[in-house]
Amino acid sequence: MIELYTAATPNGKKASIMLEETGLNYNVHKINLTEREQKEGWFLKINPNGRIPAIIDRDNDDFEVFESGAILLYLAEKTGKLIPSDDKGRSLVMQWLMFQMAGVGPMQGQANVFLRYAPEKIKFGIDRYQNETKRLYSVLDGRLGEFEYLAGDYSIADIATWPWINAHEWAGISLENYQNLTRWFELVGNRPAVIKGINVPPSEDSNESDEEKAAKITKILS
């Protein structure tokens, strides 16, 4: 049994999608980010960095794993799914996984901050991170013009990247100019495990305005 500590964020959705794809049994523990539950002592024992997601593998001596990319890799190796066994195939998956972890997530995350949460709208910051996110989207679009999925076959690289592309509108970015990325986005988004995983945990703020959502996340960031 996997204990999943998560919230409704792109990084959190990576873990729940992966658990659905692998078919592992798991319990969901929703972390209240607004109340800064992720900074409480009990959670810091699981993840010293105070971020979601994190997991505890009850079937492996209560082994704890934090960082979303590390969770994907751990679960892939545990189940033998969604990562190739050959050196070249594995390396391709790891390259595109790292591309998301080091590029798409941080840059789009900063685009979110400057566009939605900053108390003062700083044009330089908004333009800087939106443009870099668009550049990274172009890299993805070029790759997906040659291959059906990022590493050839569907893998943890796709699972890591899809939740961030799913949040493109929140960063003020359109997919209109990224034909191949759009094709991939729809293909992955129609997978049953993805459809189920993106709703774990269920969102409770669907009726909130963008301003209310931004105010709530600003409190988390403060």
Image (cartoon, grey):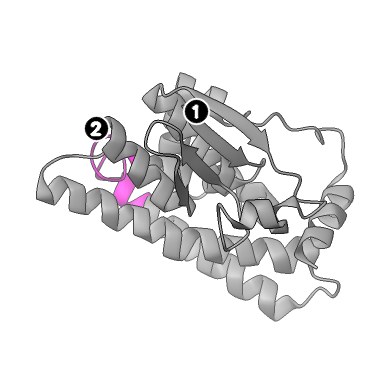
- Numbered marks: total: 2
Position of residue 129 relative to residue 156, above or below, is: below
Q: Residue at x 37, y 60 (%)?
A: 99
Q: Is residue 143 left or right of residue 106?
A: left
Measured as percent of width and height from the top left, residue 51 is found at 61, 56
State the residue position of label 2: 80
Between 148 and 62, the one nearer to me in the picture = 62
Magenta segment's dominant SS is loop
State the residue position of label 1: 194
Q: Is residue 122 left or right of residue 155?
A: right
The answer for how far apart the CA atoms under marks 2 and 1 are is 19 Å
Does the magenta portion include 175? no
Measured as percent of width and height from the top left, residue 49 is found at 58, 63
Between 20 and 129, the one nearer to me in the picture = 20
Query: Circle 1 — which element?
Result: helix
Measured as percent of width and height from the top left, residue 205 is found at 82, 36
Q: Residue at x 25, y 41 (%)?
A: 147
Measured as percent of width and height from the top left, residue 102 is found at 43, 65
Position of residue 106 relative to residue 190, above or below, is: below
Query: Circle 2 — which element?
Result: loop
Q: Which residues are magenta?
A: 141-157
Q: Earlier in the sequence, mark 2 or mark 1?
A: 2
Q: Residue at x 38, y 53 (%)?
A: 140
Residues packed near mark 1 inside 10 Å, few (<14), some (14 to 19) or many (20 plus):
many
